């Protein structure tokens, strides 16, 4: 590993044994399973395999919102995928998601069962399946999908870009931190200007667009991500902060953030099989 001032790319790249990143042991330049392990299956039709990263939170928040809306068919089992231990490379997980990234979902109510990966795809599938959290009005529905796909394209600059170099990289690097900070500030400005004239991302109606964007950008501006709120001066984005704080108070959001988590002062549930699991964790945290 070299510092940012004396690195010259080789003629042929080879993966380093250890680049100093805390995730170095699980990073590799090939895909596929590394070990055989069947995925666990619970009693419900929906089986989620995930971790409470922003992408994982999207799905558990939506599932909790569906349950809060009285849709009993959205009951689910959520199984912890410990990416630090390489669970995402097990044969059972790779069978659902060949890309070995969380979250992954299996819907066993169909024949054959439906396997889903990519958080945006899962959100859209569940919202369409249960006819909820997608606006009915044409323009609002289009806006919902516009912002859903905006998040899918934009968040890698926040997570793999800014978040990595600001929080996870083995040493500070001025150029990438400046580059990605500028882009994230631009994205925050995009959101803030939109929310100046809209209660939610698709207008007046809370939707999967908000559920997709909040775990990344909402958590960032209320300082739940990377401890970077002061660094990025997020208080400048008053409309975005107000939106983030409003959504953070939703009971289903609070519950969804707890699922597939291994720690947390407000309660956590590693594996969730019923509402009682979350209720018990909340009571224990009080």
Image (cartoon, rainbow, N blue to C red):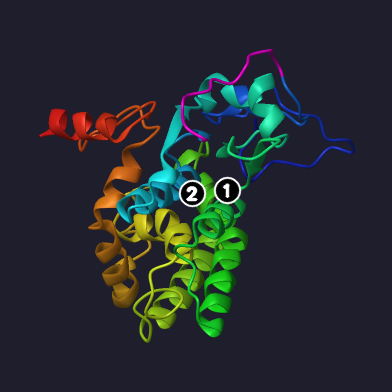
Please check the rendered image and state whether residue 42 is part of the magenta-colored stretch, yes or no. yes
Q: CA distance from mark 2 to mark 1?
A: 6 Å
Is residue 176 at least partly visible in the picture? no
Query: Percent from the top left, x then y, of residue 244?
Result: 31, 64
Decide which of 57, 232 is in the foreground and name it. 57
Residue drawn where x is 36% and y is 36% of the image: 259
- For the image, the number of numbered tags is 2
SS assignment at label 1 = helix
Magenta range: 34-45
Is residue 213 at least partly visible in the picture? yes
Which quadrant is home to the C terminus? top left
Residue identified by numbered label 2: 163
| Magenta stretch, overall SS | loop
Residue drawn where x is 62% and y is 29% of the image: 19
In the image, farthest residue toward the bottom: 197
Query: Percent from the top left, x then y, of residue 223?
Result: 30, 53
Please check the rendered image and state whether residue 215 is part of the magenta-colored stretch, yes or no. no
Q: Is residue 9 above or below residue 147?
A: above
Residue drawn where x is 52% and y is 67% of the image: 182
- Compared across the picture, whether 18 is left or right of 133 comes to right
Query: Percent from the top left, x then y, of residue 200?
Result: 38, 74
Q: Are marks 2 and 1 in contact (CB under 8 Å)?
A: yes
Q: Tell me the quarter of the picture where residue 264 sits.
A: top left
The label on residue 53 is none
Query: Percent from the top left, x then y, of residue 122?
Result: 57, 49
Residue identified by numbered label 1: 160
SS assignment at label 2 = helix
Q: Tell me the quarter of the picture where residue 101 sits.
A: top right
Residue drawn where x is 55% and y is 39% of the image: 103
Which quadrant is home to the N terminus? top right
């Amino acid at each position: 590993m070299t510092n940012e001032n004396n690195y010259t790319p080789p003629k042929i790249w080879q993966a380093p044994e250890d680049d100093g990143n805390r995730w170095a042991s699980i990073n590799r330049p090939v895909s596929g399973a590394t070990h055989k392990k069947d995925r666990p299956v619970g009693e419900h039709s929906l089986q989620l395999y995930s971790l409470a990263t922003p992408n994982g939170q999207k799905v558990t928040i939506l599932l909790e919102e569906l349950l809060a809306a009285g849709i009993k068919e959205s009951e689910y089992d959520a199984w912890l995928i410990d990416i630090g231990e390489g669970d995402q490379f097990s044969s059972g997980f790779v069978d659902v998601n060949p890309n070995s990234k969380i979250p992954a979902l299996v819907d066993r109510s169909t024949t054959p069962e439906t396997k889903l990966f990519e958080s945006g795809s899962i959100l859209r599938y569940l919202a369409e399946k249960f006819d909820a959290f997608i606006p009915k009005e044409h323009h609002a529905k289009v806006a919902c999908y516009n912002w859903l796909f905006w998040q899918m394209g934009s968040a890698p600059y926040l997570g793999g870009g800014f978040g990595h170099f600001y929080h996870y990289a083995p040493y500070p690097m001025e150029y990438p931190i400046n580059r990605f900070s500028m882009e994230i500030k631009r994205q925050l400005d995009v959101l803030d200007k939109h929310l100046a004239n809209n209660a939610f991302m698709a207008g007046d109606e809370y939707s999967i667009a908000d559920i997709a964007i909040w775990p990344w950008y909402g958590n960032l501006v209320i300082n739940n991500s990377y401890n970077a709120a002061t660094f990025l001066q997020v208080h400048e984005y008053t409309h975005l902060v107000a939106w983030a704080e409003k959504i953070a108070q939703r009971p289903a959001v609070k519950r969804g953030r707890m699922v597939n988590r291994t720690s947390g002062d407000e309660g956590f549930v590693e594996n969730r099989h019923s509402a009682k699991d979350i209720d018990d964790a909340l009571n224990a945290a009080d």
